[in-house]
Image (tube, grey):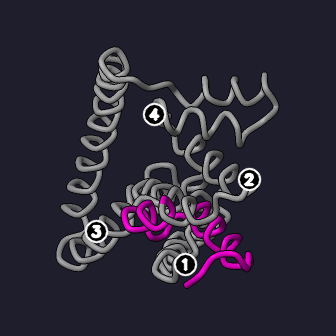
Amino acid sequence: MKTINLSKTLKQASEYFVAGQYSEALRNYSLALKDHPDSKEAYNGAILSDMAMGGESAGEALFDYYTILRNEDVETADTVISEILETMDGTLDQLAGLFDDTMKQRLAYEDGIMYTEFKELVKDENDFNRIFENIMFSTRVIITEKEDFVDFLDNLIDHGYKEMALSYLESALGVYPNDRQLRNLLRRLAKGKSIEN
């Protein structure tokens, strides 16, 4: 038994997406999929919402493209976007694999340590400032995961390296302007009084 009005739920989901309320959009697309598992619009919308929630600007751009295509030809739009998403998914997996291999090769040739090793040193010595300053002048800390990058910035802020954290944040926000975690760190820095404009 169908419990929701598909077109109304999809329309609401689309409105939430356009308003930047991606979690609400995802919830509505998911509700639509629950009762209408064959709905390509709900499926594509859910994936694009999830991408946008993760701070991927491609999600927003593809959603705009999808909307334009749907105004011209609904069936073609669903097929085109589905194919793009499938291709992106495969490409992202391949790129992640290549990135891992490249990083391992780079570590073999460069004087650097992974962030996980850096965290172990800090944990063993229980002195972030000393470890950070020693490493900063002798080697590089290589960060490959977003969570590690956020953790690193968090530690920089906690241990008084606010100008350096701000510099990294500004660069990262230039690439990922809508990333929620990065924006939260920027707000945290803005509350501090030791950063000059």
Percent coordinates x, y for residue 81 in the rendering: 26, 56
Q: Is residue 103 above or below residue 89?
A: above
Q: Are marks 3 and 1 in contact (CB under 8 Å)?
A: no
Q: Residues within 10 Å of mark 2 (few under 14, many from 20)?
A: few
The magenta stretch is: 168-197
In terms of secondary structure, where does tag 3 sit?
Answer: helix
Q: Which mark is residue 16?
A: 1
Residue highlighted by disc 2: 159
Q: Amino acid at mark 3?
A: Tyr
Rendering quarter of residue 21 = bottom right
Q: Which mark is first along the chain, 4 or 1?
A: 1
Q: In the orientation shown, which residue stands out farthest toward the right?
A: 126
Q: Amino acid at mark 2?
A: His
The residue shown at (55%, 33%) is: 135
- The overriding secondary structure of the stretch rendered in magenta is helix
Residue highlighted by disc 3: 66
In terms of secondary structure, where does tag 2 sit?
Answer: loop
Q: CA distance from mark 1 to mark 4?
A: 43 Å
Residue highlighted by disc 4: 140
Q: Amino acid at mark 1?
A: Tyr
The residue shown at (32%, 20%) is: 101
Name the foreground residue: 65 vs 96. 96
Name the foreground residue: 150 vs 108. 108
Mark in front: 3 vs 2:
2
Mark in front: 4 vs 3:
4
Percent coordinates x, y for residue 126 in the rendering: 82, 31
Q: CA distance from mark 4 to mark 3?
A: 42 Å
